[in-house]
């Protein structure tokens, strides 16, 4: 029954004011706003942030603000539809571009929000997570799960920049966001610890069978290997289907973090493809090559290191701008959260 619901104006003013005075409200004037028919109401806009636009401001931050005054030197990508101060790329996903300069240290801390890094440029950056020193090479994905100590450093030349993705809007939104500072960590794991243990998909250290699973066995996913995997998958995927891999926990085969999901897409030369419409919101980030992304009727031309926000339930079409080279995109979404909440949907 889709009848018009009563409005505030239909109520006697003294009744309405009395409700407000007692910190109460009638539901019916607002019911359709919070429970619209068919599709959610969305404030998130399909925004594009060009790296060429953000990079100069990030480099300037390197001159203006010493690392000691920043703790984390980050320019945040804020979706104007959600209000800039909310620091949300989508309702659940925070995205920032972080700069570290040679010799600098972003000090050790741990916090309740989940974070990941996706390396955009530079050499010699590293992050220490849970006593493991993880090199940061372009395109690598590095996890900093909730509660794990992490600090960043730079022992090379020139700027190092990476994309931070956090579930901060969720954790802050539920008033559960806080951090603890600590002294620098002892590196107590050998170099290449995680990647040595999980060198090849489907083959894991014997002792990890059975009951001994750790929550986060693998913290670094090198781009080189993800790209090789996508290229191999393209060779066995029908031409009209999306070449798409998920980053997973190698012991469970399931999503590697609880709220946010990570995946990578390869667009074949000349390929144009419509993604399945989903309940999840996501952020797309150009890794190699470029093209166009149509998001809810807005078309963006994107290239390397450009970042786009995709609202929940959006229509998305991706097209590779090259007829000879593949294009690669990294995706962060909130599908793991939607699945846990029992609201994950994929529409044909
Ligand atoms: O590098 O630990 O963009 O704590 C925001 C909060 C990065 C980090 C951000 C953080 C970090």
Image: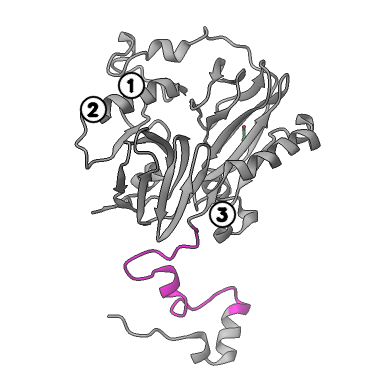
Q: Please tell me which of labels 1 and 2 falls first in the chain.
A: 2
Q: Is residue 9 left or right of residue 67?
A: left
Cα distance, mark 1 to mark 3? 35 Å
Residue 94 in picture, x, y percent from top left? 55, 45
Relative height, residue 132 to residue 148 (above, below):
above
Residue 259 seen by the camera = no
Q: Which mark is residue 220?
A: none
**What is the distance, in whole Å, between disc 2 and disc 3 at their CAs?**
37 Å
User: Label 3: few (<14), some or many (≥20) within 10 Å?
Assistant: many
Question: Residue 32 colored magenta?
Answer: yes
Label 2 element class? loop
* Residue positioned 65% across, 39% down in the render: 55
Residue 170 vertical position relative to residue 58 in the rendered view, above or below = below
At 56% across and 9% down in the image, what residue appears?
188
Instruction: Tell us which disc is closer to us: 1 or 3.
Output: 3
Q: Is residue 296 magenta?
A: no
Q: Secondary structure at mark 1?
A: loop
Q: Which residue is mark 2?
A: 235
Give the numbered dot on residue 251: 1
Provide the residue designation for mark 3: 79
* Ligand 1 - quadrant of the structure image: top right
The foreground one among 159 and 209 is: 159
Mark closest to the chain's N terminus, 1 or 3: 3
Residue 31 x %, y %: 42, 74
Tell me which residue sits at (52%, 25%) in the image: 138
Helix, strand or loop at mark 3:
loop
Q: Which residues are magenta?
A: 20-45
């Amino acid at each position: 029954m889709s009848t018009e619901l009563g409005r505030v104006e239909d109520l006697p003013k003294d009744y309405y004011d009395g409700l407000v005075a007692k910190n109460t409200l009638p539901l019916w004037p607002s019911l359709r706003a919070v429970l619209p028919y068919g599709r959610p109401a969305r404030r998130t806009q399909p925004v594009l942030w060009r790296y060429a636009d953000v990079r100069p401001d990030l480099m300037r931050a390197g001159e203006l603000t010493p690392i000691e005054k920043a703790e984390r030197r980050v320019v945040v990508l804020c979706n104007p539809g959600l209000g800039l101060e909310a620091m949300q790329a989508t309702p659940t996903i925070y995205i920032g571009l972080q700069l570290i300069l040679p010799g600098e240290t972003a000090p050790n801390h741990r916090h309740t929000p989940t974070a990941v890094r996706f390396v955009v440029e530079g050499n010699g950056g590293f992050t220490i997570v849970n006593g493991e020193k993880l090199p940061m090479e372009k395109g690598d994905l590095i996890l900093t799960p909730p509660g794990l100590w992490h600090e960043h450093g730079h022992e090379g030349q020139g700027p190092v920049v990476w994309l931070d993705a956090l579930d901060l809007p969720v954790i802050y939104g539920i008033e559960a966001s806080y951090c603890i500072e600590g002294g620098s960590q002892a590196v107590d794991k050998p170099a290449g610890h995680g990647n040595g243990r999980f060198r090849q998909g489907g083959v894991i250290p014997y002792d990890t069978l059975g009951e001994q699973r750790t929550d986060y066995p693998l913290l670094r996913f090198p781009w080189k290997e993800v790209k090789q995997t996508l290229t191999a998958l393209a060779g066995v995927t029908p031409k009209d289907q999306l070449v798409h891999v998920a980053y997973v926990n190698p012991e469970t085969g399931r999503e590697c973090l609880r709220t946010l999901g990570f995946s990578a897409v390869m667009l074949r030369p000349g390929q144009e493809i419509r993604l399945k419409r989903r309940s999840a919101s996501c952020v797309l980030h150009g890794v190699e090559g470029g093209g166009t992304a149509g998001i809810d009727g807005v078309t963006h031309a994107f290239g390397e290191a450009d970042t786009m926000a995709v609202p929940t339930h959006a229509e998305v079409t991706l097209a590779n701008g090259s007829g000879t080279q593949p294009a690669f995109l990294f995706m962060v979404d909130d599908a793991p959260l939607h699945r846990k909440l029992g609201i994950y949907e994929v529409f044909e």
